[in-house]
Image: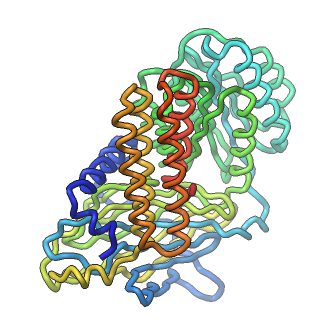
Amino acid sequence: MGSLVNGFRSARVRRGLAAGAIALATGGLVLARSSSALPRHGTTTQGPTTGPVVLDPNVTATGNNVAKFAGPGAHGQVALSHTKVLAGGGEPVFAEVKVAADKGDLAHERAPLALVVVLDTSGSMEGEKLTRAKESVLGLMRDMRDDDEIAFVRYSSGAELIQPLARLGNVRDGLAWRVRELEAAGGTNIPSGLSMGLSTLDEAGKGRVRRVVLVSDGLDSTRVQAERLASDSAERGITVSSMGIGLDFDEGYMSALARDGHGNFGFVNDGGALATFLHRELDEAASTTVENATVHLTLPRGVRFVRASGAAATVASDGTLDVKMGALFAGDERRAVLELATDLDVGDARSIGAEATWHRVGGEDADVHASALSLVATKDATEVARGEDTGVIGSATSVIASLRQIEAAEAYSQGDQEKAHHLVQQNIAALKGAAMNAPAPMAASLAKQSSAYGDQWNAFAASPSSDDGKRAAKSTAAHESSNLTRNAY
């Protein structure tokens, strides 16, 4: 059996998985239960074929259990870490979910945008940070099309709608003047700005790609409220990205907003680098081809959902697990890692059904199916080992390590360097162990991640209150947050 799975049985690694579980539970993911499954989009037809697209699972010679699906504008797969499990449970089973937007899906005319910039103008932004931020927003406006819609919200102790949602060509000059006149004053109330920004998108034209970019350099005590706003926006098909400026913002808060809003989280030392972040947001929004991508898994009796990372997950009362992947731009691939628990008797065989739905920007809705995945219970640990997918185990190890690394950065920023170094050491050991058995591409990725954590170990030796220390904590949070939804190594 692979070293990682052997490690699951050791107290040391079980404690590590528990740490990852804590991070998952506190990462702002939606784990709510609903009374029924989410409504499905209409079934897609491709050419002369009617009804859902059905593809057989790809079971490789090593016993991997992979179900692939494809439809207009996107494709993906669900892969299980095991095909056989020990009777009675006791070990987690991981499912890796991937959805990718086709690279060549920009041939059709892109849908126009509805973009909202929500900018912190609190007193701490005074000076160069606000000057550079205003220059970046003006640059963003120059790159947008006249038929794109834009809104602009400034916030400090409260929020002010500087520009209601409007066609940019009609307001470009007036909005540019108002942006230049902004001044910094007051405190930081992120939910007031985010709520106002989201509400402006109620007026967005049909078929527009909707996105909110929130910028802040500060702290406030309203994280739960802001996270709820971001997750609710994702349910409505709105992407929320967040950018922290300087060294005094709460990276845990800002990264959670982006995770819940299915957007990006970035960190820059000053307002100047904000331009790069805003241009990336514009490029991604402009090339978005898939919205509301969701993978639906039908969990049978004896198989239970535990937690998810990389996507919001909702369990319906009938056992359907809806994994919400959000919007994707052409060529983009998003991943989520799910932990499942089993409680089966020897010889029990269970099937997990897989279906995916999404909306193709400027086109039709898709509803595609893959053949069922399988799990069989046995009392023979050797049989369990033969059915392992070390690639999925490696991906799960990478994600859990990122969660622990975010926890390490938080501990470090709070002055607990001993805990931070312990978590980093634990991650390096887990990644090296998984790399020993993973397929070559995954092994290389895990080795790169392990090496990066060695550098972070050294960075965490600086005083947490120093500029270098603050920069290390925020850079770690930004990079590891991106690894939860896309392989960043």
Residue at 49% x, 73% y is 77
Q: Quadrant of the C terminus?
A: bottom right
| 333 left or right, relative to 379 | right
Residue at 58% x, 55% y is 327
Residue at 36% x, 76% y is 353
Pick the front one: 207 or 466? 466
Q: Is residue 354 visible?
A: yes
Residue at 30% x, 68% y is 5
| 125 left or right, relative to 484 | right
Residue 83 placement: quadrant: bottom left
Pick the front one: 181 or 365? 181
Residue 227 placement: quadrant: top left
User: Relative to 178, does residue 36 appear above or below in the rendering?
Assistant: below
Percent of width and height locating residue 175: 79, 25
User: Relative to 400, does residue 251 appear above or below in the rendering?
Assistant: above
Percent of width and height locating residue 117: 67, 32
Pick the front one: 226 or 454? 454
| 177 left or right, relative to 189 | right
Percent of width and height locating residue 377: 20, 80
Percent of width and height locating residue 391: 45, 72
Marks counted in the figure total 0
Residue 277 placement: quadrant: top right
User: Relative to 210, does residue 372 appear above or below in the rendering?
Assistant: below
Q: Is residue 236 visible?
A: no
